Amino acid sequence: MNSDKAQKADLVWRDGAPVSARFDDPYYSMNDGLAEARHVFLDGNNLPEQFCEGFHIAELGFGSGLNLLATWEMWEQTGMTSPLRFTSFEAYPMDMGEMAKALAVWPELAEYAERLLAGGLQMRADTLELNVITGDARATLPKWKGKADAWFLDGFSPAKNPELWSPEIIQSVAAHTAPSGTFATYTAAGHVRRALIHAGFNVMRPKGHGSKRHMSAGVLM
């Protein structure tokens, strides 16, 4: 496994959902995390319309793996048979038992959860190439050699985890984005949007999931 001083996730469980004790923030929306993942990260990146052979998604914050599973399901349901390339940067990885407990909330994804848990965080399958790079993204992302066609920016809240939303991180995201690549995130925080614009993204503010007024999405110009 790629590693740069990764630390174990520090979890508490509230109503069956994982919450980071370190950041006092849930790993996914308590108001149907799967629906939010589909709305924010899939719809926000115009998926599956962008899907093509060799498509590469990168993500800040692997968490429980929910975003991966939602995307992998869509990839296969769309009829793609080549591997989806998925790279995620995670400083505090869950262990497999914690991940299994977190993902058990969505029985509709049980098949994909089982495949993920069997394959692990460095996984090569017919329809998925997964690489979870562990450690502080401020150190690991600048050293990454890849470029993503779409980004899922899914760190903990900018107010609670500002390091993962800094202008320097956003610049690294842009530097590792393919031409006309896209991003989506649940946050519409002004300083995050300004950093994205400064990094070269055209930033839009569509409606957020559920009661959230706005999110952010855009394309590298």
Image (spheres, rainbow, N blue to C red):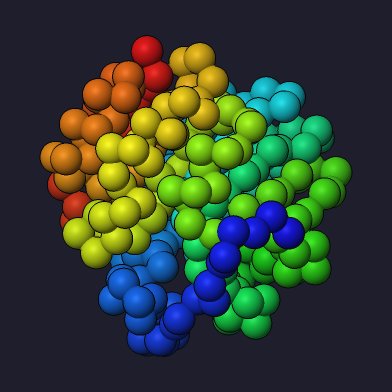
Find residue 19 and report its horizontal and vertical position in percent. 38, 77
Q: Quadrant of the C terminus?
A: top left
187 vs 149: above or below: below
How many discs appear?
Answer: 0
Residue 52 in sight in this render: yes
Query: Is residue 128 or residue 160 the one in the foreground?
Result: 160
Q: Is residue 166 left or right of residue 172?
A: left
Query: Is residue 3 or residue 190 the one in the foreground?
Result: 3
Find residue 136 and report its horizontal and vertical position in percent. 48, 57
Q: Residue at x 64, y 32 (%)?
A: 145
Query: Is residue 88 or residue 211 the one in the foreground?
Result: 88
Q: Residue at x 40, y 45 (%)?
A: 153
Q: Residue at x 73, y 69 (%)?
A: 117
Residue 83 location, quadrant: top right
55 vs 131: above or below: above
Residue 66 location, quadrant: bottom right
Query: Is residue 112 or residue 203 the one in the foreground?
Result: 203
Q: Is residue 132 left or right of residue 118?
A: left
189 vs 162: above or below: above
Find residue 6 and report its horizontal and vertical position in percent. 56, 66
Q: Is residue 80 left or right of residue 60?
A: right
Find residue 192 and report its horizontal and vertical position in percent. 23, 40
Q: Residue at x 24, y 33 (%)?
A: 195
108 vs 38: above or below: below
Residue 36 in sight in this render: no
Specify the farthest residue to the right.
126
Q: Quadrant of the N terminus?
A: bottom right
